[in-house]
Amino acid sequence: MFRNESAAMGLPMRMVVLTIVGMAGLAAMIMFIGDMELVPRSIHADIIGIDNTTTSSVIHAGSGIRNITVQVVDVDGRAVEDATVTIYGLHTSATGLTGQGGCAVISLDTSSISVTGEGYLRLSAKAQGFMDAKNNFALKVVSS
């Protein structure tokens, strides 16, 4: 039926060349995927001081402007620069940006805080390449 065998003569060599080219392409794709960060790394944000003291994590509603120092670190304990840090809740909010040491000082006006008895302000930190960090009970607020 088919008597022309010229196509089958170079077939083994073609298979070897295509296998080598395919393996090289697969290796390049695996290397590229391996260099990508598929899962964002975690960060953690903590309030480390209020008005340059570390003795309390409680503020009083209506007590004026409070300077709150927040530190943002990654899972390895390294400072995270350029993270946006927000303290919010109880009808108030304030935002800051972390610097080289991973710290941000946020000026929070407590005159607009509305609380009966006690409540909590939330803390969130966001940075490019990292998962967002949130703490719903970051700072206790008591009524004056």
Image (cartoon, rainbow, N blue to C red):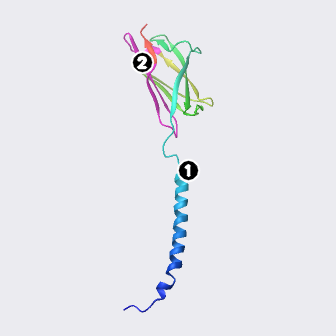
Q: SS at mark 1? A: helix
- Counting from the top left corner in percent of width and height, residue 139 is at 47, 18
Q: Position of residue 140 (x, y in %)?
A: 45, 15
Looking at the picture, how far across and down is residue 100, in whole percent? 63, 31
The residue at the far front in this view is 12
Q: What stretch is highlighted in magenta?
A: 110-138
Quadrant, the C terminus = top left
Q: Which amino acid does label 1 sit on?
A: Asp
Quarter of the image for residue 20 reads bottom right
Q: Residue at x 52, y 24 (%)?
A: 46
Instruction: Using the image as rendered, state which of residue 29 and residue 79 is in the foreground.
Output: 29
Camera-nearest label, 1 or 2: 1
Circle on res. 120 = 2
Mark 2 falls on what kind of element? strand
Q: Position of residue 4 (x, y in %)?
A: 44, 91
Q: Does residue 132 belong to the magenta stretch?
A: yes
Quadrant of the image containing the N terminus:
bottom left
Kind of residue indicated by mark 2: Tyr
Q: Which mark is residue 35?
A: 1
Residue 8, numbered label: none
Q: Residue at x 49, y 46 (%)?
A: 38
Residue found at x 57% / y 15%? 54
Tell me the distance, in whole angstroms, between the alpha carbons under discs 1 and 2.
41 Å
Reply above or below: 144 against 13. Answer: above
Q: Which residue lies furthest to the right in this view?
A: 100
Q: What is the crowding at mark 1: few (fewer than 14 residues within 10 Å), some, or many (at least 20)?
A: few
Instruction: First in sequence, mark 1 or 2: give its number.
Output: 1
